């Protein structure tokens, strides 16, 4: 082959090499682009998964925060209930102690009355009873008064002095003194002074209250005088025994609500 023919193949060879090289470059470029796209897709998926995990984490954190808030509310509620129960227990304990102290004082007063009036109790002239925080002393009229009279007899004065000695020491009770009669109207001789049994029962109650104040040193502010006439019998007026029971003076010791309110207010203000 001549030199001229050899030179004729050179351009073709160069062209072929250029084409081959271009194809290789294009192939490599395409392959790199596909890999880049695959990597980009994987990166996008990873980002989506990361975002999903972040959303899940936020939701879990929100749920945890709500649970913590609910637990804190429960703790606060339980603490409040515990404090309320503690206060209620303390108040109940205080109430029980006060009631026990009041019952002890009531029993001491009852025992004192029994001791001071044992002679009259033994003969049936005085009757003592106790119920629901109250003490009642029933005195038949003949112990204190002469028949049909409202003035206190000498024996009645002696009895009331002993009664007043006990009542003067009782500072947490109101004392109601009430007069009662049977259904027989006052005698003709007494009707100018006591037209009906109302006047007689009231006069007797007032005289007992005055005597307890003046001779027994029982504070007047703690006493009440009332007359019921024949309206509250405790026996049958058809028999002499029943009529005798109905002619009586009742001395009733009842809780002094005003004194209790004052004590409660004083205790509250002192806290």
Image (cartoon, rainbow, N blue to C red):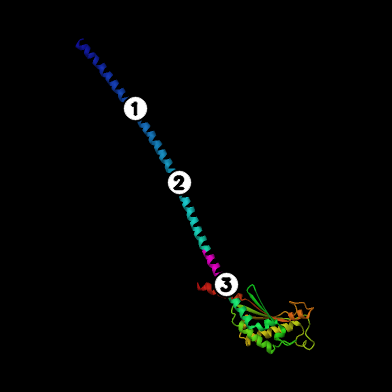
Q: Residue at (53%, 63%) from the top-left corner?
A: 85
Q: Name, please, the residue furthest toward the bottom.
A: 154
**Magenta segment: does it hold 88?**
yes
**Which of marks 3 and 2 precedes in the sequence?**
2
Residue 23: give x, y in percent of width and height. 31, 22
Of the numbered discs in the image, which one, if any, rests on residue 31? 1
Q: Is residue 88 above or below residue 226?
A: above
Q: Quadrant of residue 205?
A: bottom right
Asked whether 233 or 48 is in front, the reply is 233
Q: Residue at (65%, 85%) from the top-left corner?
A: 160
Residue 119: give x, y in percent of width and height. 66, 84
Of the numbered discs in the image, which one, if any, rests on residue 199? none
Please provide the residue range marked out in magenta.
Answer: 86-96
How many C-alpha atoms fall within 10 Å of the one at disc 1: few (<14), some, or many (≥20)?
few
Q: Quadrant of residue 195?
A: bottom right
Q: Is residue 250 above or below residue 67?
A: below
Left or right position of 101 against 127 = left
Kindly report the secondary structure that dominates the magenta region of the rendered protein: helix
Asked whether 229 or 34 is in front, the reply is 229
Give me the C-alpha separation between circle 1 and circle 2.
Answer: 43 Å
Q: Residue at (40%, 38%) from the top-left corner?
A: 47
Q: Nearer the viewer, mark 1 or mark 2?
A: 2
SS for dot 2? helix
**Which of marks 1 and 3 precedes in the sequence?**
1
SS for dot 3? helix
Of the numbered discs in the image, which one, if any, rests on residue 100? 3
**Magenta segment: does it hold 222?**
no
Residue 156: give x, y in percent of width and height. 68, 87
Of the numbered discs in the image, which one, if any, rests on residue 60? 2
Residue 43: give x, y in percent of width and height. 38, 36
SS for dot 1? helix
């Amino acid at each position: 082959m001549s030199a001229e023919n050899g030179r004729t193949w050179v351009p073709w060879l160069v062209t072929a090499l250029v084409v081959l090289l271009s194809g290789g470059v294009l192939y490599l470029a395409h392959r790199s682009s596909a890999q880049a796209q695959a990597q980009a897709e994987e990166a996008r998926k990873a980002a989506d998964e990361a975002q999903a995990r972040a959303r899940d984490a936020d939701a879990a954190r929100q749920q945890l925060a709500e649970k913590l808030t609910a637990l804190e509310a429960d703790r606060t509620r339980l603490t409040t209930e515990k404090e309320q129960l503690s206060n209620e227990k303390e108040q109940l304990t205080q109430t029980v102690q006060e009631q026990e102290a009041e019952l002890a004082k009531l029993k001491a007063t009852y025992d004192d009355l029994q001791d001071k009036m044992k002679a009259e109790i033994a003969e049936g002239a005085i009757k003592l009873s106790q119920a629901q925080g109250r003490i009642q002393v029933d005195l038949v009229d003949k112990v204190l008064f002469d028949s049909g009279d409202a003035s206190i007899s000498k024996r009645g004065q002696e009895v009331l002095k002993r009664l007043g000695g006990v009542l003067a020491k009782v500072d947490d009770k109101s004392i109601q003194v009430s007069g009662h009669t049977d259904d027989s109207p006052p005698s003709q001789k007494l009707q100018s002074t006591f037209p009906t049994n109302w006047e007689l029962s009231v006069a007797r109650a007032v005289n007992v209250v005055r005597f307890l104040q003046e001779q027994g040193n029982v504070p007047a502010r703690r006493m009440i005088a009332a007359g019921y006439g024949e309206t509250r019998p405790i026996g049958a007026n058809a028999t002499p025994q029943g009529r005798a029971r109905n002619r009586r003076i009742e001395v009733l010791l009842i809780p002094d609500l005003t004194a209790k309110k004052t004590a409660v207010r004083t205790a509250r203000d002192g806290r």
